[in-house]
Amino acid sequence: MNTQTLNLIIAFVATVILGIFIVPKLRKLKIGQIVREEGPKSHLKKNGTPIMGGIIMIIVLTIILAINAVNYKNLILAIVAILGCGLIGFVDDYKKLIKKNTDGLSPKKKIFGLLIVTAIFIFLYLKVFGLGTDIIIPIFNQPFTLSMPVFIIFTAFVLIGTTNAVNLTDGLDGLASGVVAIVMTFFTIMAMKNQETDMIILGSATVGTCLGFLIFNFHPAKVFMGDTGSFALGGAVAAIAIILKMPLYLLIVAFVCVFDTISVALQVIYFKLTKGKRLFKMAPFHHHLELSGINEVKVVYIFWGVTLILCALAYFI
């Protein structure tokens, strides 16, 4: 059995087994979702659904990657991104649950935490593993070497931006886990094409974990990943894109996450410029589609479909 299939199956089975034990524990501990009052009214019925299910994914991914890191040192970078970003998400979820509000960790503290993780990641990437400052330009498919300062700033932007983008996309049952599964399938295929075994392991393990989590997370969700999971997955996506020298491809394959993020920024800017008017019925954009009359499951399928098409397009350019 090849590497990608084996790791995908192991991650999938491990996630399902762990989920069977952890999801009831979260429910028993009453670690439940607090739905925002200003959110879609159809989401109010989700109040009390267990969150922080991302712990399941972090445990599975960390164990699989740690075992393989003995032979493939670059996986240490992925572990740093997943654990570091996941920890920030965990603190955010923890604060929400303890204080029983939807504010959690302040945006400034989130960014500060992500900057620390990013600094550690970049230091290891450049100084310990010596992976260089080159990136591949889509369409031209040629490496381009960045100056050290530009690379550091750009990589920090990619890691922090990707983490937040996946976090914002995690607003509907199965949306983020499905999108990440498709995006990581793309990067796994690219890793196979380039015969980069370490990234094949990272990609396939993440895909398997996402698919296993979808059993509990697809509509109607029995558990949510919370910021714990979305930040960790964002770290995984950023890590594989950066290590494969393909961060610019995120603009294509993760477009739905990028657009969700842009929609939030546009909503805020438009609201301030027009003194209270809204560009979208609600941001991120997936909520706008919901309030426009498209039911939650259809919105998820649309985002999955668009991601699949864009990943296929990215493969051929």
Image (cartoon, helix red, strand yellow):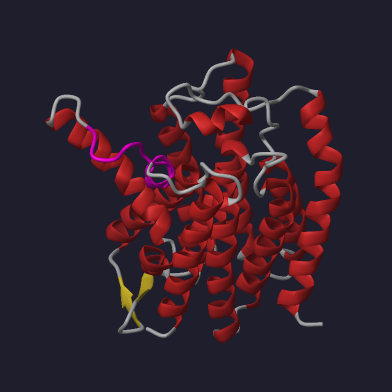
Q: Nearer the viewer, residue 108 or 150?
A: 108
**Horizontally, is 205 left or right of 191 in the view?**
right
**Residue 161 vertical position relative to residue 307 in the rendered view, above or below:** above
Q: Quadrant of residue 185?
A: bottom right
Give the x, y percent position of residue 43: 55, 32
Q: Is residue 205 magenta?
A: no
**Horizontally, is 24 left or right of 245 in the view?**
right
Say how many tags the image has: 0
Q: Residue at x 40, y 47 (%)?
A: 289
Q: Residue at x 48, y 69 (%)?
A: 131
Magenta range: 278-291
Q: Quadrant of the C terminus?
A: bottom left
Q: Quadrant of residue 137?
A: bottom left
Q: Is residue 130 visible?
A: no
Q: Is residue 185 visible?
A: yes
Give the x, y percent position of residue 294: 45, 49
Q: Nearer the viewer, residue 174 or 194?
A: 174
Q: Is residue 288 magenta?
A: yes
**Residue 36 vertical position relative to residue 139 in the rendered view, above or below:** above
Q: Of all residues shown, which one is farthest toward the front?
A: 293
Q: Nearer the viewer, residue 282 or 252?
A: 282
Q: Quadrant of the N terminus?
A: bottom right
Q: Quadrant of residue 197?
A: bottom right
Give the x, y percent position of residue 115: 43, 41
Q: Residue at x 70, y 32 (%)?
A: 50
**Horizontally, is 182 left or right of 280 in the view?**
right
